Amino acid sequence: MLNKVREDYKKSKLFFVIKALLTLSAIYFAVRVIFISSSVLPNSNTLPDNMNLLIFGMLFSLGLSSLVKVVEMLVYKKKEYFILQLLNTIFVLGVSVFILWT
């Protein structure tokens, strides 16, 4: 696994850094959602109002990370799993927008 990370870093440092930052922001939002929901569970039946924004931030970060992978595939002309990655990006970004609206 470490060899794959090194290979990705050597290929393109820009794509690697962008994906890493977006993944770290998604992890940050996920941890915040876990801590807030676990502290609210014993006290009440309702979740805080900002929970939708945290979930939106998490999914939007994941969607943007996936979009960076799609752009990277286009730049390097990788065709393996391109359609699947594109559908994944559209789905995650669509769900994040839907959560923001509700």
Image (tube, rainbow, N blue to C red):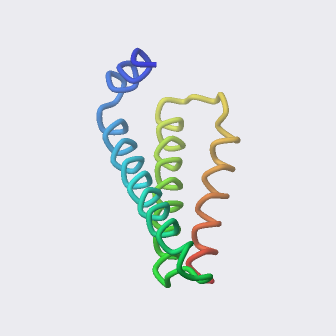
What is the number of callouts on the image?
0
Outermost residue to the top: 3
**Among the 4 quarters of the image, the one containing residue 81:** top right
Q: In the image, is 97 to the left or to the right of 6? A: right
Q: Position of residue 4 (x, y in %)?
A: 44, 19
* Residue shown at 53% from the left, 76% from the top: 52
Q: Position of residue 98 (x, y in %)?
A: 64, 75
**Among the 4 quarters of the image, the one containing residue 14:** top left
Viewer-side residue, 68 vs 54: 54
* Residue shown at 42% from the left, 51% from the top: 27
Q: Is residue 1 above or below residue 96?
A: above
**Among the 4 quarters of the image, the one containing residue 95:** bottom right
Q: Is residue 99 above or below residue 30?
A: below
* Residue shown at 46% from the left, 19% from the top: 1
Viewer-side residue, 55 vs 93: 55
Q: In the image, is 13 to the left or to the right of 80? A: left
Viewer-side residue, 32 vs 94: 32
* Residue shown at 45% from the left, 69% from the top: 36
Q: Position of residue 102 (x, y in %)?
A: 63, 83
Q: Position of residue 59 (x, y in %)?
A: 53, 60
Q: Is residue 17 above or below residue 8?
A: below
Q: In the image, is 96 to the left or to the right of 48? A: right
Viewer-side residue, 41 vs 47: 41
